[in-house]
Image: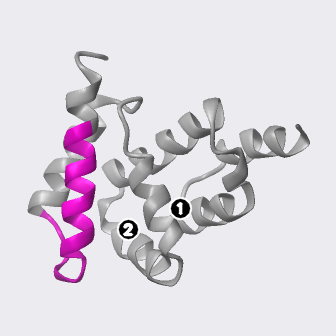
Amino acid sequence: MADAQAAENAVDQLDSWQAIHAAYRRYAHCDDGSIAEGFTDKVVHLLATRWGSLGQAQRIAARDSGFQSFMLRHIDSTALTSELDRIAHSARHQCPRSATVLCKQIAGAAEAANSDAGPRE
């Protein structure tokens, strides 16, 4: 219970891939319900608004394969459709050469989430 509260508080502070990774490592066992939605909000918002930081996420994922799965899992239908659209566009049109496989996975996850979501916003 204390971990869940700490995870909830930590999610509110996530503003970089390093911070998200640290929270993932510490609170992965709490990744459910409102905490999972918080992780989704932060992962999707960071991808949508700071696409240029994708290289940081890629470097972390190269060292920790579970983090890449975590990141992709949190591109889901609870996110804002406008942010999912932005992510899919960036992944398709602004992908660094070193991240083509990751970008395809991100675009696929964003498009699948948007088709699952239906109209929102």
Q: Position of residue 118 (x, y in %)?
A: 23, 19
Prevalent SS, magenta region: helix
Q: Residue at x 19, y 49 (%)?
A: 88
- Establish if 34 lies above or below 50: above
In which quadrant of the rendered view does residue 110 lie? top left
Q: Is residue 64 magenta?
A: no
Q: Residue at x 35, y 76 (%)?
A: 55
Residue 110 or 17: which is nearer the viewer? 110
Q: Quadrant of the N terminus?
A: top right
Q: Which residue is mark 1?
A: 16
The local secondary structure at tag 2 comes to helix
> Which region shows up in magenta?
94-112
Amino acid type for the residue under numbered disc 2? Ser
In which quadrant of the rendered view does residue 22 lie? bottom right
- Establish if 49 lies above or below 17: above
The local secondary structure at tag 1 comes to loop
Q: How many marks?
A: 2
Report the side of 37 relative to 111 (left or right). right
Report the side of 21 relative to 9 (left or right). left
Task: For the residues labelled 2 and 1, say whether their Cβ atoms are less than 8 Å apart.
Answer: yes
Amino acid type for the residue under numbered disc 1? Ser
Q: Residue at x 39, y 55 (%)?
A: 72
**Among numbered discs 2 and 1, the one appearing first in the sequence:** 1
Residue found at the far left of this picture: 93
